[in-house]
Image (cartoon, rainbow, N blue to C red):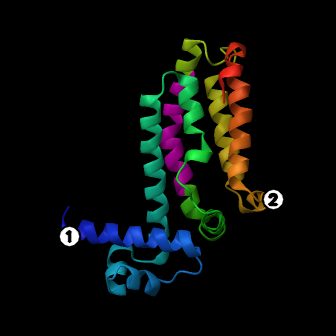
Amino acid sequence: MDLKRNKREQILEKATELFFARGVADVSMDDIAAAVPAAKMTIYKYFQSKDRLVGAVMERYVREQHEIMNRKIEESPDTLSALASILDYQNMPVVPERFIRESLELYPQIIADLLHYYREHMHDQLRDLIVRGQEEGVIRKELSPHILMVYMQGVTEFFARPDVLAQFHDLRLLGEQFRTMFLYGIAAPNDWSAQP
């Protein structure tokens, strides 16, 4: 890894640590510069603004989650197990609720960009997984994969609204409830006892 890439990664890593520990609003570029250590000008050289740095932190997280999703699909014995594993919020890397809530509130354009990444890179992959599950007989065949994906996208975009998210105090519980409802809703009747 060359020095430029290494410095950029160091900045991203320290920014992530600080944002997760203290929240986005309470971390300054000076704080990040001191933690790296690097000159504040060096941070601006790579990221131009705090907004871009926050965006890079979130983008990296989403890409890492996509890689984890791909690995879970490859390692799972069947489609329903893969979906259960992908939606297993208890075993995902912890992202502090404060970071999530502040990001939704303060950086709506970044969130919109991440939702676009989901639609462009993960949507079709999940739809194909549902089709495969129908072929395996573990997902109900009468459900349209397209409509299931519209449903998942709608739920994701709905909960990406700060006014909606403010109604919930425990995001992990929210994720687990969604997982249970989704999996029991799509599982073929003979697979209900096996999941989640």
Q: Give whichever of discs 1 and 2 has the lower sequence position.
A: 1
Label 1: how many residues lie within 10 Å, few (<14), some (14-19) or many (20+)? few
Q: CA distance from mark 1 to mark 2?
A: 45 Å
Q: Residue at x 26, y 66 (%)?
A: 5
In the rendered view, tell whether residue 80 sits above or below residue 9: above
Magenta residue span = 113-130
- Judge left or right: residue 8 versus residue 152: left
Overall secondary structure of the magenta section: helix
Q: Is there CB contact under 8 Å for labels 1 and 2?
A: no
Identify which amino acid the numbered label 1 is placed on.
Leu
Label 2: how many residues lie within 10 Å, few (<14), some (14-19) or many (20+)? few
Please, what secondary structure does the residue beneath circle 1 have? helix
Q: Residue at x 69, y 13 (%)?
A: 190
Q: Check disc 2 and report the residue beneath it.
A: 167
Res 74 → quadrant: top left
Q: Check disc 1 and report the residue beneath it.
A: 3
Looking at the picture, how far across and down is residue 92, in whole percent? 55, 48
